[in-house]
Amino acid sequence: MPGRSILGIGPFVRDDGADHIGAKADSMFPCPISGKIIPWENKSVLCAGAVVKDNKVFMFYRAEDLSRGNSWGTSRIGLAVSEDGRHFKRHPIPVLYPDRDFMRITNGLAVARTLASRKQRMALML
């Protein structure tokens, strides 16, 4: 039911003027596993989460490619940034992705990770 309160928060209203972050066929990325330039978010975009820092919204999302057809694709984590919470600019390449290192898993990235730096820590629950 539109406008209905869920879990005591809301009601939520769809903002038709806001950007939609969906699958994008022309996002190319030099894959370190295959050694090829691939469309990294051409199958689906899902599991988004956002944080607000310095008056900007940082939206992290999981994107899959079509490397295995309509089955599960390789997952990578993308980032889109907004100054108003409605209009987002995507980073052109994923911010987390499988590589030939100790973090490598078969199907890409799809679990919670913690990013750490000298200045701050940020937990991603995707």
Image (cartoon, rainbow, N blue to C red):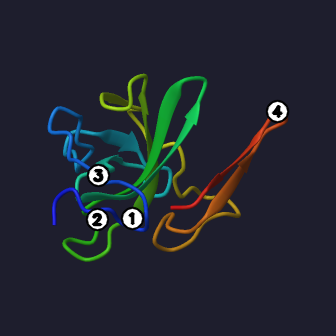
Q: Secondary structure at mark 4?
A: loop
Alpha-carbon neighbours of circle 4 within 10 Å: few (<14), some, or many (≥20)? Answer: few
For residue 67, which numbered disc appears in the image? 2
Residue 32 position, x and y percent, is 50, 50
Foreground: disc 3 or disc 2 = 3
Along the viewing direction, whichever of 51 and 23 lies nearer the viewer = 51
Along the viewing direction, whichever of 79 and 84 lies nearer the viewer = 84
Indicate which disc, 4 or 1, sits on the residue closer to the N terminus: 1
CA distance separating discs 3 and 1: 32 Å
Q: Quickly name the residue at label 4.
A: 119
CA distance separating discs 1 and 2: 7 Å
Q: Image height check: is 10 above or below 83?
A: below
> In which quadrant of the rendered view does residue 67 lie?
bottom left
Indicate which disc, 3 or 1, sits on the residue closer to the N terminus: 3
Q: Are marks 2 and 4 in contact (CB under 8 Å)?
A: no
**Could you tell me which residue is drawn at 22 percent across and 50 percent down?**
23
Indicate which disc, 1 or 2, sits on the residue closer to the N terminus: 2
CA distance separating discs 3 and 2: 36 Å
Indicate which disc, 2 or 4, sits on the residue closer to the N terminus: 2
Indicate which disc, 3 or 2, sits on the residue closer to the N terminus: 3
Indicate which disc, 4 or 3, sits on the residue closer to the N terminus: 3
Q: Amino acid at mark 1?
A: Thr
Residue 106 position, x and y percent, is 50, 74
Residue 93 position, x and y percent, is 42, 38
Q: Quickly name the residue at label 3.
A: 12
Q: Quickly name the residue at label 1.
A: 74
Foreground: disc 2 or disc 4 = 4
Q: Amino acid at mark 2?
A: Ser
